[in-house]
Amino acid sequence: MTAPAQKTNFRAVDAWYCALALIVTDALVVFWIRFAAKHSFKFYYFWESTTGSICSVLIQGFLWFFWALWFSRVSNTRELFFKVGLNKKINLYGYVAAWVAFLIALFSHCATSYGWVTAVKNVNHIDHDELVGFYYFFFAAKTIALMPFIEEVTTRGFIYSALREKYKMPLCIFLIIAFASYFHRSLITSSSFEFLILVLFVVLLCIVRENTNSLWNCILCHGVYNAAAIQLWYPVMIFMICLLPFVLFGTRADKLREKLDSPEKETIG
């Protein structure tokens, strides 16, 4: 059995404000970058470089984290992390869900590779022969760890949790799908199949968030999916196999702790 996500006392209206702020600032940043790149070759080459890519990730990460921190109305970062469930461990529910995320990525890969659906350019695919050294490490770290962490803290940790304070689960999932579709519009507009994959993935993450106290479960699912999406199949499987003993041990320790903390019933006799 898994415990449902704890009440956060976030406000649904703040989730709307946060989503709107992210969309507006994203549009403004994209407009500024395109304008600057169009009028300056130096800026264009800088933005296409590894340093430019790092700056892009830092700007995006700052905006997502800043708006979540601002609209959640918490006093500090520690309070936000506690409310969204970063103080809890990965459990067996999240571990199994991560394998489901892996299968979704595998299904997407097979569907396009074997011609079941029309193949489109996958922005997550990388050529391992071209990306070497620091840039390869940076791309992998960004895709597998950094962006899943930032996106889950903001999207499932704050926005979804805040919406659930007021709305039913199906409506909240629909709103999160619409929100995610905006930020993945370049991919899903090229193929209806990619939109289906996005819907399946978002639904999975929302279900995990709904049924567990730990946001690390969502981060694990997101990271595993992204790693599989860039075709790191064997490293993902090895990592998941190695992770299982720690998950089982942590789950057992948590159950034992709950048993010891619960007051024993007094016997009358």
Image (cartoon, rainbow, N blue to C red):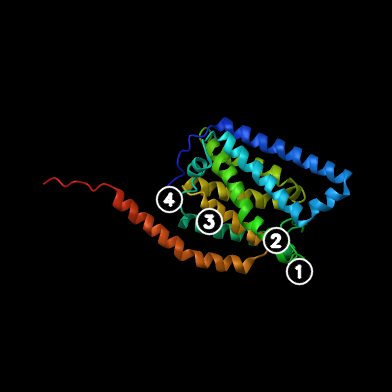
What residue is pinned by disc 4?
Answer: 2
Residue 60 lies, in percent from the top left, at 68, 45
Give the residue at the far top of this rendering.
Answer: 13
Q: Nearer the viewer, mark 3 or mark 2?
A: 3
What residue is pinned by disc 1?
Answer: 129
Disc 1 crowd rating (10 Å Cα; few below 14, some 14-19, many 20+) is: few
Label 3, label 2: how far apart the Cα atoms are = 21 Å
| Of callouts 4 and 2, the N-terminal one | 4
Residue sitting at 57 percent across and 55 percent down? 221
Residue sitting at 58 percent across and 42 percent down? 173
Residue 89 lies, in percent from the top left, at 46, 54
**Residue type highlighted by circle 3:** Ala
Label 3, label 4: how far apart the Cα atoms are = 13 Å
Q: Nearer the viewer, mark 1 or mark 2?
A: 1
Residue sitting at 59 percent across and 59 percent down? 224
In contact (CB < 8 Å): disc 3 and disc 4: no
**Residue type highlighted by circle 4:** Thr
Disc 4 crowd rating (10 Å Cα; few below 14, some 14-19, many 20+) is: few
**Residue type highlighted by circle 2:** Ala
Label 1, label 3: how far apart the Cα atoms are = 32 Å
In contact (CB < 8 Å): disc 4 and disc 2: no
| Of callouts 1 and 3, the N-terminal one | 3
Residue 35 lies, in percent from the top left, at 84, 41
Q: Nearer the viewer, mark 1 or mark 3?
A: 1
